[in-house]
Amino acid sequence: MSQSQQESSPDVSSADATQPDAKVFAYHNPAGGWGALKSVGKHLLHSRSPALNARSLFKLNQPDGFDCPGCAWGDPEHASSFEFCENGVKAVTWEATAKRVTRQFFARHSVSELKTWDDYRLEDQGRLVEPMRYNAETDHYEPIGWDAALDLIAAELKALPSPNDGIFYTSGKACNESAYVFQLLARFFGTNNLPDCSNMCHEASGSAMNAALGTGKGSVLLEDFEKAEAIFVFGQNPGTNHPRMLGVLREAAERGATIVTFNTLKERGLEKFADPQKPFEMLHNGSHRISSHYFRPKLGGDMAVVRGMAKALFARDAAGDDVLDHDFMAEHTAHLQAYRTRVEATDWATLEDQSGLTRDEMEQAAELYARSNATIACWAMGITQHEHSVATVREIINLLMLRGNMGKPGAGPSPVRGHSNVQGDRTMGIFEKPSKALLDALEARYARAMPQEFGVDSVAAVKAMRDAPGKVFIGLGGNFTRAISDSVVTEQAMANCRLTAFISTKLNRSHLVTGEQALILPCIGRTEIDANSAGKSQLITVEDSMSMVHGSAGINKPADKSLRSEIFILTGIAERLFANDELGNDGVDWASLREDYDVIREHIADVIPGFVDFNQRVRQPRGFWLPNSVASLEFATATGKAEFSDDALPQAVMHQRLAKRDGWLTLQTMRSHDQYNTTVYGYNDRYRGIEGGRQVIFLNRDDIARLGFEAGQWVDLVGESDDGVTRRVDGFKIVAYDTPQGCAAAYYPETNPLLPLDHKGVQSHTPASKSIAVRLEASTRLA
Ligand SMILES: Nc1nc2c(c(=O)[nH]1)N[C@H]1C(S)=C(S)[C@@H](COP(=O)(O)OP(=O)(O)OC[C@H]3O[C@@H](n4cnc5c(=O)[nH]c(N)nc54)[C@H](O)[C@@H]3O)O[C@H]1N2
Ligand SMILES: Nc1nc2c(c(=O)[nH]1)N[C@H]1C(S)=C(S)[C@@H](COP(=O)(O)OP(=O)(O)OC[C@H]3O[C@@H](n4cnc5c(=O)[nH]c(N)nc54)[C@H](O)[C@@H]3O)O[C@H]1N2
Ligand SMILES: [Mo]
């Protein structure tokens, strides 16, 4: 990066300097409980339409209602009278707010001014209502009609020298129908540039499972949690991020299943939970223990932990103990010996050093595993957002195979997804590296050549925009600029575009980092009625983390009559691009897709495996299950079997590398209880005892003293600058917390400026946002 570019850096961290000061308190209650109910009430009121929203909640995850936009956790077979959690309430009330971002708002506030606002304040302005176009001369967004906006996008796309100068980003909230149309649009246009939020999320799970098992998806169903004897939870904070999972874990714990947690932080939700859906428990202030065992590895230490468990099992097997399922492995797996040799050659000192756990603890975990005849392994971002995440997920799969924990009830891998339809979007073909089978199916269906060259993932998209100005970036939902790493570099890259266009429900920072031209295209949300031109409301569909595909129909009136559906916007662009193009449009009647989503589903049924009779099957009460080859012990791998990996442990993970550098710590960037990714609902993180602010850094007590600081003191976080880019964020309050030495934690996205673009996963290319090198400097910020 050149000097001049650095000097013109937008000051990303200054946006956060307006954030209020956090109070720190000790949280002694269980997760859930009255605190969760109180928060529900608060968020209903804040939406300014509490009665309407209370009504909406009873339609959440019901057969005749809409899918919760909160997370990808599955729905039970027999829906209870209400099937929502605090997380879902926040997601619904945030969307169904009475507040509006009008043209007068944009006239009052310049883009430069809005850039100084933090993420909370931006989204809290309410729903976007009409299409807006950036005017660089006045530095304000101004109204533009739908036709003019879509004409502009089509014209800019057509003017690109190559289709690969178009970038089509998807956030995992997009429904199956939007996702399918979006990938069709990009591929008809001629590119596989389809980066998505999965690139920053569970990409490692998909890569690892595809290689090991021939499918990128988990095989566990919700019913399996009722049958598991043990559930191992790696690097996940369900109390905040998948609250409905806590109810399931709690029931499992109650019936005697062993729940074993591996988490770098002590997370309240994994210790104790009071279920707000259980009146007796609520009235008696009861609660239930969740984890029977809680291990705290160092950041990035899980591969070593699991290998240590395998080492313990192999040793016991060698001594004649019946701890391995040799029949299962002989029949269904390949390459066991190579793995065994690798594990046996790894010494305990190396495993202890890398994992941060003792040999004793790893042997104890192995014993818990050996005692269970049906084990589920769950994992999330604490596993997938490291450099060696693919190898770590494979190690978890290895562990499951050692005891035949696949293809039977109550057992198997369960990567717990984030966004409510992130898994479905991939099923629909949102992927920069499409399979040959998908491209062939598209070519056969549309008699049109599909681009064969792989496209850019999220990190590569930033590099492409940084290195070659003049791209067109279209965002189907999300907040790409804020979600991806290296915020300063990313913002410069986005500003290089000839056009940025975001299809969005709420105002966010991505709208403010404008290309030469910029558009905001406001759309109907999941909670709202999506009606066609004849007034008939449309059904959309999603796929949850357990591969259940079901319908969803909003019940609220759209926030404004000017809003359009995502499909309206996407088909509008497609019509303008492909009607009468030299490829002849190949008979796609885009208007018919828009008028009736059943038609889109017919296209999907023709192209995507597993969707035969899609329209009929999705109208069954619970939808339908996409068969999973792992569940039936069929493995589409080279050997036709489930394959052990024998990856070497990384030479040194971040905390080991930093142990040699005085004053440096490994920082994980995670979610507070009051946020949904870059959407900040408020400044509290109840279970971690934080109130009224987000600029905090959680540190081990001994580290605080060793580094010469005190709890409550303000510090600036300084990242690596080997490549000449200054990486720092200022004004974070020190909070003493139960986490291993050398490990620190702070919230994303405020800390994304610290994460170098190139610090990413091997193979997955996922930003390694759970292991960032930082050091602390005393801050000038005053309390
Ligand atoms: N309320 C709410 N719900 C959400 C979201 C949200 O932002 N808010 N986001 C959604 C999305 S997109 C996703 S992907 C999921 C994310 O769900 P999570 O993966 O639970 O999200 P994070 O907050 O990143 O939490 C990571 C957890 O892993 C632990 N951890 C970090 N590094 C390590 C490690 O190296 N080893 C181990 N063993 N543990 C580690 C952290 O301490 C933390 O508990 O949630 C989804 N649901
Ligand atoms: N440092 C760090 N970075 C991370 C992570 C981390 O743990 N640490 N996590 C990563 C992960 S797991 C993920 S998934 C990504 C998330 O990245 P994204 O999915 O890109 O981000 P979100 O914050 O979920 O997007 C919020 C925006 O989506 C828009 N939106 C909401 N609902 C709708 C809708 O129904 N339709 C449309 N069109 N738009 C809508 C709103 O305008 C809102 O502002 O962030 C990643 N970034
Ligand atoms: Mo995610």
Image (cartoon, helix red, strand yellow):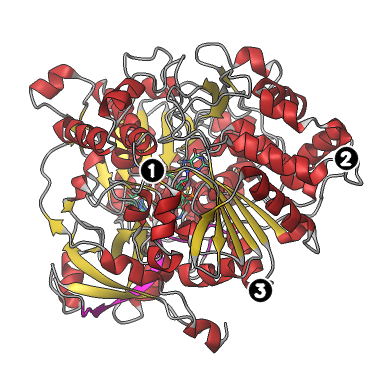
Magenta residue check for 512: no
Mark 1 residue crowding within 10 angstroms, few (<14) / some (14–19) / many (20+): some
Corner quadrant of residue 16 = bottom left
* Mark 2 burial class by Cα count in 10 Å: few <14, some 14-19, many 20+: some
Q: Residue 75: x and y, percent?
A: 43, 22
The mark found on residue 467 in the picture is 3
Residue 160, placed above or below residue 425: below
- At 19% from the left and 46% from the top, the residue drawn is 686
Tell me the residue that label 1 is attached to: 100
**Which label sits on residue 249?**
none
Q: Determine the secondary structure under disc 1.
A: strand
Query: Which residue is farthest left?
Result: 284
Any atom of ligand 2 within 8 Å of the CB at mark 3?
A: no
Disc with the residue nearer the chain's start (2 vs 3): 2
Residue 716 is at least partly visible in this image? yes
Observer-nearest of 235 and 657: 235
Using the image, determine if residue 485 lies above or below residue 366.
below
Magenta segment includes 772: yes
User: Which range is magenta?
Assistant: 760-780
Q: Horizontal and vertical percent for residue 300?
A: 41, 59
Disc number for residue 448: 2
Specify whether residue 322 is in view: no
Q: In terms of sequence position, does the residue under pointer 1 or pointer 2 come before the other?
A: 1
Disc 3 marks a residue whose amino acid type is Asp
For the stretch drawn in magenta, what is the main secondary structure? loop
Where is 533 relative to 590, above or below?
A: above
